Image: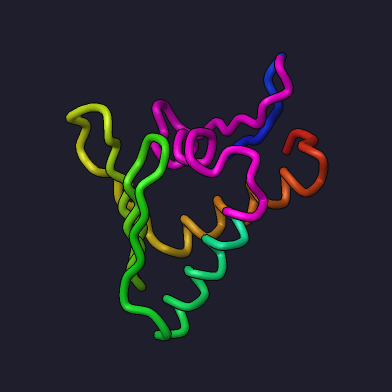
Amino acid sequence: MQFYRDEAGDPRARGADHDPLADFLESDVQGSALYAWELLGVVDRLLEDDLEEWARGGNSYYLTLTPESALLEHGSDDAPAHEVPLHDFRDAVAGWLEFLESGGRPS
């Protein structure tokens, strides 16, 4: 996944064609390092068997996290839910956070 700033200076993510995870980072996490840190904390609790499930609605997606996966359900269309392994979700959020905290230099 690639992270960059657009012409307006907004953080953007690019993955495979129409990657829901990249879209989630842009639309729901946006420029919030605080939310990215919160997500990483929740993932760590799930991986440590300290939490069974966590869910939250956002700007575009409803996110459900379990010890195995992250399920992204888009709220505005009939697109199928997108499921990714929890470790892949964690890697994407950690990369996004690193990008944000580095001042948004392209990766």
Q: Quadrant of residue 3?
A: top right
Q: Toward the viewer: 95 or 7?
A: 7
Q: Toward the viewer: 93 or 14?
A: 93
Please provide percent x and percent y for residue 103.
82, 40
Q: Toward the viewer: 39 or 93?
A: 39
Q: Toward the viewer: 52 or 34?
A: 34
Please state if 74 lies on the left or on the right of 4 as rendered. Answer: left
Please state if 68 lies on the left or on the right of 40 as rendered. Answer: left
> Is 44 located above or below residue 22 in the figure?
below
**Where are the magenta residues, as a range?**
8-35
| The magenta stretch spans residue 80 | no
| The magenta stretch spans residue 9 | yes
Residue at the image position 32 percent from the left and 47 percent from the top:
62
Please provide percent x and percent y for residue 83.
30, 51
Please provide percent x and percent y for residue 5.
71, 26
Rendered-image quadrant of the N terminus: top right
Residue at the image position 42 percent from the left and 36 percent from the top:
59
Residue at the image position 56 percent from the left and 64 percent from the top:
40
Q: Quadrant of residue 38?
A: bottom right
Please provide percent x and percent y for residue 79.
22, 31
> Is 63 located above or below residue 81 in the figure?
below
Residue at the image position 47 percent from the left and 57 percent from the top:
88
